[in-house]
Structures are given as structure tokens and as C-alpha cells.
Amino acid sequence: MTEAIALESTPPVGLLARLARLLPGIALLFVIGYAGKVSEQVLRRYGTAHHLALPNIEYVLWAILFGLIIANTVGVAQVFRPGIATYEVWLKSGIVLLGARFLLGDVLKLGGISLALVAIELAVAIGLMTVLGRAFKLKPKLTSLLAVGSSICGVSAIIAAQGAIEADDEDATFAIAAILALGAFGLFTYPVLGRLLHMSDHAFGVWAGLAVDNTAEAVAAGALYSDAAGKVAVLTKSTRNAMIGFVVLGYALYWAARGQAHQVANKAAFVWQKFPKFVLGFLFISLLATLGAFHKAEISSLANLSRWAFLLTFAGVGLKTDFRELRKQGVRPFVVGALAELFITIVTLGLVLGAAALFHL
Amino acid sequence: MSNGSRRISLDWWTVIAALAAAALIKAGLIPNVPW
């Protein structure tokens, strides 16, 4: 996963200075996320007080909307950017903590079903994006980045692949903007489609985890549907993320064979380096919970801490999604991404509905 | 972790932070996290 804001272990003074640079952005994430939480409560109380049947708009949606509005109108000042980039830290910490709410047996059962569906989704997404990229005459490495982003885990996968296949910064920036914009679109439409199709919480969670590209948006889409769907979306998306090393390795070997990227000396080390370590943390906490290491109140505290971490994450999703970035490479790559996403949405929906019927999700 | 530059990746930081929080809750130093 991304190393973009990796923190050096030494020297201590440098570390403190780096942490100080993060504070304004983290404070902004908290303010926006908390404003989302307050908005949800205020709307609910207003509806109750005035006997109005107002829709229950979750803090998730408010936080993302507030972030989107700021990022795409007044913009985000430079002083906030390092801290906003920490939204991935909060996301992954939140996922690790969420492990306390899973028994390992459930993880293995649902993870096994998810793994089979993920394998099919990967093949469809990579194949489709490659065909569409050629048909629309996109730059080959941009096509590779879009394929990695749409098949695995969005932004992190694109950053990992950019270094491995030596793609241009411009292509990576566009691919990230496209994946985030498409993810934002999915975030607003998937829960509506799920309700229309009367999908169960489990089935919807698997679908969100399979079809929504960026991890934060997949978690948000699940959480918008229901708490249970959010949990399942995290698990399915983490299964998908675990495949990142293999897919990026495949692309690295492909471009190295064409003399347009470095050779990969040690393939096992390459896969381990790209493997998302937070998945191991999630499994470890889940193992502890399964062994009874936490009592009920502790699990509740861990789950609430996870919610606070996600609150910061969702604010970051909105703030990082800048639709203006999409204009820089024209409409063609975005159309390719959107067409592929539409097809992936339909295929994964079919897969999930089939799996739901077979395994009673 | 990579050997040469002694950098800890973002992923490991997230795991360390989450496990530290879990340990604090388990030890009773954070008795109750409200939502």
C-alpha cells in the first residue's frame, strides 16, 4: 500500500516536526467529520421534534459532502494537505480495530467466499480495462494504472503500481482523480440500488467491497447501507486488497519484459513489500476477540474507536476528491474508466446475487 | 520495514497504533470510548 507519508523512525526532532506539520490537516478532518456527526443528529432531532419523516442521512454522507464542497470550491490550502493525507492512516487503523467485532471463523468463511468472487472480479476488471484502453487509444501505462486501480484497491494500488511500472506522475494523478471521482459516484448510487434490489446487509457489503475501488469509499458505501453491511464491506475489500502484490507484480514483469521498467529481482519480497500489512493487524485483533481476550465493554470501546477513525477517513475522502483534476487529460480516459466501472458494477452485482442465493449471504 | 533506510511503512504504523490503542483499552487506561 502507499508509502507516501511513511514516517521515519529517526531522528526524533525530525519526527516531531513532521508530526507538527500534520496537525492542521488532522484538525480539519476532525472538524469536518464531527460536523457530519452533528448534522446527522440535528436533522434527526428536528424531524422528531416536528413530527416529520425526514430521511436519516448518516454522518458518513455529511462528512464526505462537506469535504467535497470544500475541495471543489474554495480548495484546500497547502497547510492542511499533509494532515489530510493521513486519512489512510485512520482508515487502516479503523479497519484493524474493527477486527474486534469479527470472530475468526466468520472471517474465514466470508473471506473464502469473497476470495473466489475477488478472483473473478480481478480477471474481469483487468481484461475489460485493457480492451477499453486499447479501443480508446489511451497511453498504455495509463491503461495499466486504471486497470490496477479499478481491479484492486484504488489509490493505494495506483501509487504502488506507479513506482513498479515507472509511469508518469501526470498519469498517476489522473488515474487517482478518476478512481476517486468514480468511487464518489458509486458511493451515492450503490446504496440506492441496493435498496431497490432489496439486498441483504451481507450481500450489499460483499458487493460494495467488490465493486467500489477505493477502500475508504467501499467502507463508506457499506456503512451508508447499514452497520452490518459496513463490516462485511471492510472484510471483502480487505480480501481484495490482499491481492495487490500479485497484480502489481504481474504489471511490473509485463513492463520490465518490454524494457520500460526495472526487472524484479526477488518476486516473493516484491509481493510481501506490497502486501497490505493492516490486513494482518485486522486478523490478529479478530483472533484475540475469538479467543475471548476482550469483554463486551472493551469490544464496544474498540468498535467506537474504529468509528472515530472512520469519521476522519470519510472527511478525507471528500477533501481528496478534486473533480478539476479530471479536466487535465480530457474526457477520454474518464469515459474508459466510467464504462469499465459500469460493466464491473453489473458483473459483480450478478456474482453477488448468485453467491447470495448459493451461500445465503 | 526496509533495511537500508530504517523506514517503517504506513501500514505498519497503522497496525502499531491500533494495537497500542487496543492494549490501552485492555489495560483499563481508556475505560470507555463513547460514540
Image: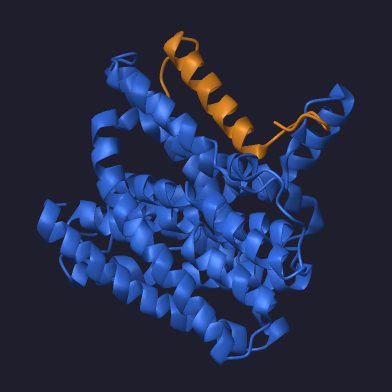
The residue that appears at 43% across and 39% down in the rendered structure is A307
Q: Position of residue A301 (x, y in %)?
A: 39, 25
The residue that appears at 37% across and 64% down in the rendered structure is A121
User: In this image, A327 relative to A66: left or right?
Assistant: right
In this rendered view, identify the residue nearer to me: A146 or B34.
Answer: A146
In this rendered view, identify the residue nearer to me: A220 or A126.
Answer: A126
Q: Where is residue A42 in the image (x, y as percent from the top left)?
A: 38, 52
> In the rendered image of this protein, which colour is used for chain B?
orange
In which quadrant will I find the N terminus of chain B?
Answer: top right
The residue that appears at 37% across and 56% down in the rendered structure is A209
> In the rendered image of this protein, which colour is used for chain A?
blue
Q: Position of residue A156 (x, y in %)?
A: 60, 54
Asked whether residue A73 appears in the rendered view, the answer is no
User: In this image, A124 relative to A232: left or right?
Assistant: right
Give the mark count.
0
Q: Where is residue A87 in the image (x, y as percent from the top left)?
A: 60, 47
In this rendered view, identify the residue nearer to me: A357 or A272.
Answer: A272
In which quadrant will I find the C terminus of chain B?
Answer: top left
Asked whether residue A35 appears in the rendered view, the answer is yes
The residue that appears at 18% across and 65% down in the rendered structure is A353
